[in-house]
Image (tube, rainbow, N blue to C red):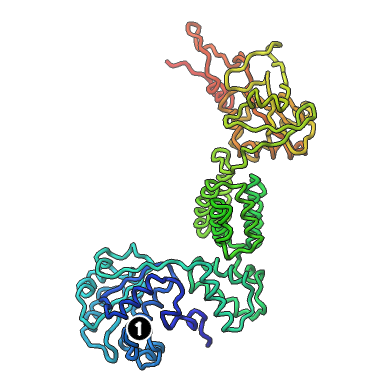
Amino acid sequence: MSTTLYRKYRPQTFADVVGQKHIVQTLTNALKFGRVGQAYLLTGPRGTGKTTLARLFAKAINCSDRKKNDAEPCNRCQHCLLMDEGRSLDIIEIDAASHTGVDNIRELRETIKLPPSLGSHKVYIIDEVHMLSIGAFNALLKTLEEPPAHVVFILATTALHKVPDTIISRCQRFDLSRFPIKLIVEKLEKIAKAEKLKIEKGALQIIALTAEGGMRDAESLLTQIAALGVSPITEDKVIEILGTTKKENVFLFLRLIGNKELYPSLAFVRKLSDDGVDLAIFCGVLLHSLRDLLLVSADPTNGPQMLENLTNEQKTTLSEFATIFSPADIVQMLEYFQVAQVGSKSSVIPELPLEIAIVKILSDNNQPITDSSKQTTTKTPTGQEGNHAETPDGQQPSDSDSQQTPTPKKIKIKTATTTQEKPAKEGQATVAEIAPTSSDTPDKASNIDISIVREKWAAILNTAKELNASLSLALSTARPVATSGAVITIAVKYPFHKERLDERANQLTLANAFDSILGSKIKLSIVLEETAPSAQEVKKADTADEAVLSPLVTQAMELLGGKLVKES
């Protein structure tokens, strides 16, 4: 039976160890100067070399032919050979996951009194030590603090927070970190060359990204792919096997986000899911790309030069994105997509966490995309082009700006109750005076007749309510009052209805309803209808005490079929 690559190419000397330089340096110095401690604790994510370092250190401690002032085991003496074959009686490996009880530790305490059979020390390697029970930890405490002179303990764990502080304080602790992508690719290249595998470097980079910093995971994935017997192993083949995606797809997704295209972004995620892409892995690749983009955005001149793993074309694309996204935008996306990456692994609907992140990022309330404040080119009613910049509060540009750019003419509409124009309240738009802004003008303007809108109004309302039933209340007082090109003005009676319909998600719902009925792309302008309370909104509560109900109470009674009851 063939040996897996991660076991076959496990480092046999400290020089073969990839990364973890500070830990290797400390352990080798302890061997060189004869300062080997009694207990060590190695902690870190899976596949970062905890067991490998523990075995190397144990082998070097007992190596009989190890040179003076040198830490490397000879790999030729009897002890080294027995260690490589897994038959050494002086190196005892214990899996704490299957030896969790107090009795197992008591048995260990009895055996440590016996001297080593061949080497100078007995080394106990306890893997996944956090799995021990509380009783087992308590039984281990005294022995760990004062073991016999010939005993060395090496504990390893991936969950340091589960190890009692009393155990940690009795050990020399070393924290192992995940491997950089560059180091993983270099190791995989050496293995591929030794195994005579023809594999593209892009494919190795995808394997390294998918491994998420774990060398053992990367080597296991390479074993899986090599078992297919395909030669050469291409980037597309690795993507198909691992369910990941290309950098180009990530860049396409970021371009949709930069253009604030909500529906295409959501459709892109759905397409990835339909194609069998693991969305958690996609989010991981996306986070790596955003991290690179943050570096380029912070320093457009020197940042791209530090990204050695990327092609010149990819660096150019990131430099382009750096002009669209600010560092604050990128940090916000990193936060949202990091949550989505974790959620996609456990969600019943894997696409949902990523879709939620997209909606939050493109929400008007968050305003994460820097170019949302850039100037847009529109055509004025006179047919001339002008640049209109939106101010933060949504007001029209100042007089000095209007001298350079013609201001659109205001549309005046008479209400049904009066033929005179009424002044609008400060900070509110009314039906009597509506000025469509440049953002209301679609790219391809089309003329919509108000009579058609009114004719189809009932169908539009029904469609909108089917898309979002919660809009029924806000739409109950809405009515179309005017059109200008492809801009349709909708009037509502109450401010809270206007606020509800002005929300971005509800604007998209209404736009979809209009598009499906009218068959044309439109823009909506929601305004307040400035009219006095009608006779239906005035109720006589008593002959001696007449009261006008608030619009909210009146509307609630009309919708729910309620009536006013006099208190007895």
Where residue 108 sits: x, y (%)? 25, 80
Q: Quadrant of residue 123?
A: bottom left
| Callout 1 secondary element | loop
493 shown above or below 242: above
Q: Which of 108 and 24 is in front in this view?
A: 24
Where residue 317 sits: x, y (%)? 65, 55
Q: Quadrant of residue 423?
A: top right
Q: Which residue lies furthest to the top in this view?
A: 544
The residue shown at (59%, 42%) is 370
Judge left or right: residue 81 versus residue 332. left
Where residue 326 sits: x, y (%)? 56, 46
Q: Are there few (<14), some (14-19), or many (20+) residues within 10 Å of tag 1?
A: few
Where residue 554 sits: x, y (%)? 55, 21
Judge left or right: residue 226 versus residue 339. right
Judge left or right: residue 466 versus residue 24. right
Q: In which quarter of the image is residue 527?
A: top right
19 shown above or below 340: below
Q: At label 1, which amino acid type do we have?
A: Asp
Question: Where is mark 1, residue-wise?
Answer: 70
Residue 546 in view of the camera: yes
Judge left or right: residue 353 versus residue 19. right
Q: Nearer the viewer, residue 524 or 26?
A: 26
